[in-house]
Amino acid sequence: MIPDTFIQDLLARIDIVDLVDSYVPLKKAGANYAACCPFHNEKSPSFTVSPSKQFYHCFGCGAHGTAIGFVMEYQGLGFVDAVKELAGRAGMPVPDSGGGSFHDEKPGQTRTLVEIMARTAQYYKEQLKASPRAITYCKQRGLSGEIAARFGIGYAPDGWQNLQAVFPDYNADELKLAGLVIENDSGRRYDRFRDRLMIPIINPKGDIIAFGGRIIDQGEPKYLNSPETPLFEKGRELFGLPQARQALRDTNTAIVTEGYMDVIALAQNGVGNAVATLGTATTATHVGKLLRQVDRVVFCFDGDNAGRKAAWRALENSLEALADNKRLGFVFLPPEHDPDSYIRAQGKAEFDRQVVQATPLSDFLLRELAQRCDLTSSEGKAQLIYEAKPLLLKLPTPLLRLQLVKRLAEASGFAQSEVERLCELKSFVPAPPPKVKRSAPSLTRNLLRIVLHKPQLAAQLPPELLPDTPERPALLRLHQLVTGQRETGSYAVLREQLRGLPEETMIENAAAELLGQAFDETEAETEFRDTVDKLRAAEQKRLFAELQLKAQQFGVAGLSAAEKQAYIQLLGTQPNRS
């Protein structure tokens, strides 16, 4: 929904070197900048940022992209949120391209709500310091002052309208919109959170967007979260993600729990890579957000029946976010424990062991399905396949799906092909080895190199002359994107236009090769024309050989009038062979 012209303007305004350096200190390395990659562990720098082309590339893990891509990967944001983040940095209002589906709020409303939440959080922190009862409760839970500060923990005192001390205009619409106050049927307002330990919920940008309140001592409900607001959508947000960012990189594993007190207790005991869902089942959005930052997600829920049901819902909602190079696992604690009580009772080493030995997704899935079916009967075996079908259809990962199909076949007694047919899966047939393409690969590779250095030249590419090489689809796509544009942006702009297209990886890899190459911008057009001339000469040679062979087989009379004319013209372009 964001106009392409805005993306171009945004990328022109943002300097990727300054952006990346604000997260990861960069050092000059020739014409580029280098650092240890923020997306995987390494001892020597293989992460390179190009100021001239405005993109980054890691030669170790392959991470690659523009300023937008960096924010998406580093902060775990979606495309739209990353654009909003960068636009905020650049002081650019994000436009609505129509339909009202991108920006429905009033101008400045989001910033106003963020400021209100920040002031409220500060008030709650001050109240915690002044409440011996709340401090005693924190100590009983084993929370140190350092952890309380790290998570911004505060206290909402008992009473009906305490926030009036912070916001004299207690009837302001924004307080209700932020979810801080409730209005009863008679129109009287009162604070939503009263006599609760207050935990701010922070988005990846560092803004407080909601609160979770834990009752002190006894009372119901034990946990109370902010309602959904223009800032807070619980199906998208994960508690503790900003605080866990470094530990996620260090461990390449995210631990998902059900409650924010679990996250805080785990952090207190040295496990910093835990996050929590917020009063809702794990969603595909949650899992996708985590799998952009780590390769393994482990769900660690309570050991009772409710915890197992939550784990199964997490499995069902995670399948569509999976990739073959990503893994999901499940830890089931003893029924009397949750992650908070378990790590306090058993210690970090034992908890770490549980995470390392987590039940793989495939084992959990098959075990749960088997428990629902009587595998000693034909009816039960048929039910097993029936129950598995919707789950297999959700899986976008062919390798894992193939493994599950094989195991289902073993458990049910059906043949593997029968399981695939019954579940309406396409059988996996290995692709034939690619044909070796020998038609001038160096010329098309050189054209791709030139065009990525100087994208406006893509409009001058002659599609009819491009031979059938691996680079041809990428060159045709660049030609399509650039042709007709009044102004052609940098490679970074093109890279964003390629997002999600089939040629994205080919062009990304070619761009990465350019990082270490010198290139004379002044000679680009000359080199481009020379390469096109060579392609034209090669095409003429091929066409002449084709017509000559036909003339030899059928005589000149066997050529059409157009072919005769072309043959005569081409005859004059061939080298003298006498």
Image (spheres, rainbow, N blue to C red):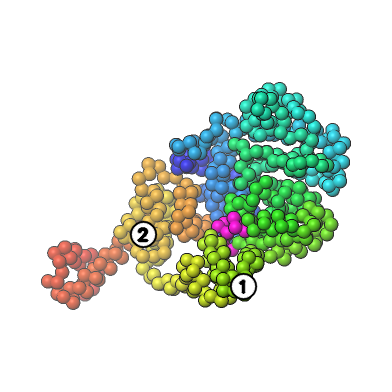
Seen from the viewer's position, the closer of residues 360 and 459 is 360
Q: Quadrant of the C terminus?
A: bottom left
- Looking at numbered disc 1 in the image, what kind of residue is underneath it? Leu
Q: Position of residue 506 (x, y in %)?
A: 47, 60
Residue 97 falls within the magenta-colored stretch:
no
In the image, 236: left or right of 565? Answer: right
Cα distance between the residues tagged 1 and 2: 67 Å
In the rendered view, would you say 417 is above or below 125?
A: below
Prevailing secondary structure class for the magenta stretch in the rendered image: helix
In the rendered view, would you say 123 is above or below 324?
A: above
Report whether residue 253 is seen. no
**Residue shown at the point (70%, 51%) measured from the top left:** 258
Q: Which mark is residue 531?
A: 2
Label whose residue precedes the other's in the sequence (1 or 2): 1
Seen from the viewer's position, the closer of residues 149 and 163 is 163
What residue does disc 1 label? 375
Q: Which mark is residue 171?
A: none
Q: Residue furthest top?
A: 168
Q: Residue furthest left?
A: 557
Bounds of the magenta segment? 315-325
Secondary structure state at the residue bearing disc 1? loop
**Residue shown at the point (60%, 44%) measured from the top left:** 19
In the rendered view, would you say 331 is above or below 420?
A: above
Q: Position of residue 385 (x, y in %)?
A: 55, 68
Report whether residue 492 is seen. yes
Seen from the viewer's position, the closer of residues 489 and 237 is 237
- Judge the density around disc 2: few (<14), some (14-19), many (≥20) Cα neighbours within 10 Å: some
In the image, 449: left or right of 365? Answer: left
